[in-house]
Image (cartoon, helix red, strand yellow):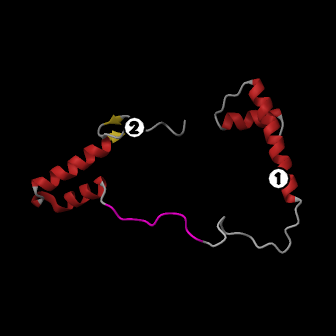
Amino acid sequence: MDHILLDRTCRLAELELSESEKENMLKDLENMVTLFETISELDTEGVAPLSGVLEDGGNVLREDVVAETAAKAEGLAAEAGAGLAASAGADVMAKREALLRNAPELQDGLFVVPKTFS
């Protein structure tokens, strides 16, 4: 890794680094490359590849649980149409309002999130 490649990488990642930060980053990247080169020199003949980090193959993730959401409730309410009881409609709106209260910023009843791409 050289300064030109680091500058290009920083520009693509939209990072602004000071000269001292660039020097530290270059050292860190060179250390990583050295580590990868060392690892690639290891003899892995006869070592079975892992498909995951757990030896027993167990799943540490929770089971999927189906739960009612505001969007699902709104969809059901829309499907029911004019025959929907007022209490059910109020329940849907109460759930929606409860969810929207968690948002740091709203616009037109929707969550506002930071721009991801420039």
| Disc 2 secondary structure class | loop
Q: Residue at x 21, y 52 (%)?
A: 92
Residue receiving disc 1: 36
Circle 2 residues within 10 Å: few <14, some 14–19, many ≥20: few
Quarter that holds the N terminus:
top right
Label pair 2/1, CB-CB below 8 angstroms = no
Q: Nearer the viewer, mark 2 or mark 1?
A: 1
Stretch of the chain drawn in magenta:
58-67
Circle 1 residues within 10 Å: few <14, some 14–19, many ≥20: few
Relative to the observer, which residue lies in front, 91 or 2?
Answer: 91
* Residue 62 vertical placement versus 1 (above, below): below
In magenta segment, residue 9: no
- The circle drawn on residue 79 is none
Relative to the observer, which residue lies in front, 71 or 35?
Answer: 35
Quarter residue 68 falls in: bottom left
Image spot of residue 108 (x, y percent): 29, 37
Q: Amino acid at mark 1?
A: Phe
- The circle drawn on residue 112 is 2
